[in-house]
Amino acid sequence: MARLSRYRIGEEDIDNAISELVEMAKGREINTDLVQEMITSSIRMLRESNDRGDLKIANAALKEMRYSFNVFESYRGQKKASIFGSARTPEDHPLYELTRKLGAGLAKEDWMVITGAGPGIMTAGIEGAGSEMSFGVGIKLPFESTTSQFISGDPKLVNFRYFFTRKLMFMKESSGFILMPGGFGTMDEGFELLTLMQTGKMMSTPVVFLDEPNGTYWERFDEFIRGTLIQDNYVGENDLNLYLLAKTAEEAIEELKHFYANYLSQRFVDGIMVLRMKRPISDTALSSINREFSDIITRGEIERCEISKDELADKDNLNSHRLRFNFDKRHWASLRQIINQINDF
């Protein structure tokens, strides 16, 4: 049955015309209310905005997202890792070879790779993984129009006008993130990742800061976090659990693999956090987790549960085992530690 949206123009003839148009399109009935709302927002913008520039931004962003969703749709069941790093890293630099090795190692473990499709670290990641296992998420810049030779012309290459829609695809489509040394862009991507996870705007995901064995780039970054942000109480010491420092490609890959050794995903159901797993954990392990993390539970305790009606309706991880608890929605780094323990038991 088609869903009807309550978000409307408020004029019967226009609202009916929108509903009829969506019905004529014959898309998935479960999504009709959302499409009605998007069209309604467009009509409201037409009436309310006098600035053509505002409409250009909204129009371009929606078109970029639609195209990107379509490109990634066929690969939704495949694990993907985003690799961030400098476009200025030359081919003869040890970091280039490390990234190439990283891409190859991920592909060997059946992980696809997502990079910015440009030169330097981005090209190294694609070169290592191979074009069949790579996505390019490029950005149109006035000073840099080079696309990696290893992804140019590939249908899995998407070019963006806006950084915010590009970053949305990185964050939304990736099951893990590995950051190599880089400039402002790499810092921006790294801090946004940590911010999204620290605030619960992005579900827990493994984040690895990778450097060559003798490199100090991420060590100095970590020193800044510990010596300034934590010391001055801008972030909590527990937030250090949101990322890992690594010195080899193997270590970085192992961190991504370990994150999904048993854990599958998480979801709120009627305000209650539900963690999905491949295998059940023992009573002893469950008791241990309850003792250690009682401070992030608002009432009750962490307990096993059956699949919910909402999950059944969405066909969401139907065959997995589940834990649920009343999460305080604040201590996301502690939730990351619970996931680690689920994978260790």
Image (cartoon, rainbow, N blue to C red):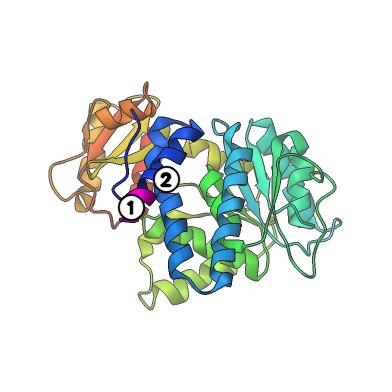
Count residues near mark 1 (Cα–Cα under 10 Å), then give few for <14, some for 14-19, many for 20+: some
Mark 2 or 1, nearer chain start:
1
Count residues near mark 2 (Cα–Cα under 10 Å), then give few for <14, some for 14-19, many for 20+: many
- Give 235 or 9, whichever is nearer the viewer: 9
Q: Position of residue 5 (x, y in %)?
A: 32, 44
Q: What is the C-alpha distance between the residues marked 2 and 1? A: 9 Å
Query: Who's the residue at 68% across and 65% down the image?
Result: 182
The label number, if any, that marks residue 259 in the structure image: none
- Give 322 or 10, whichever is nearer the viewer: 10
| Circle 1 residue | 8
- Give 210 or 52, whichever is nearer the viewer: 52
Question: Is 179 displayed left or right of 312 in the figure?
Answer: right
Question: Is 127 displayed left or right of 261 in the figure?
Answer: right
> Are the residues at dot 2 and dot 1 in contact (C-beta closer than 8 Å)?
yes
Query: Who's the residue at 44% across and 51% down the image?
Result: 38
Query: Who's the residue at 45% across and 58% down the image?
Result: 43
Query: Who's the residue at 64% across and 66% down the image?
Result: 185
The quarter of the rendered structure image containing the N terminus is top left
Q: Position of residue 130 (x, y in %)?
A: 77, 37
Q: In what element is the residue under mark 1? A: loop
Question: Is 272 displayed left or right of 250 in the figure?
Answer: left
Residue type highlighted by circle 2 = Ile
Q: In what element is the residue under mark 2? A: helix
Residue type highlighted by circle 1 = Arg
Q: Position of residue 212 (x, y in %)?
A: 70, 56
The boundaries of the magenta stretch are 8-14
| Circle 2 residue | 18
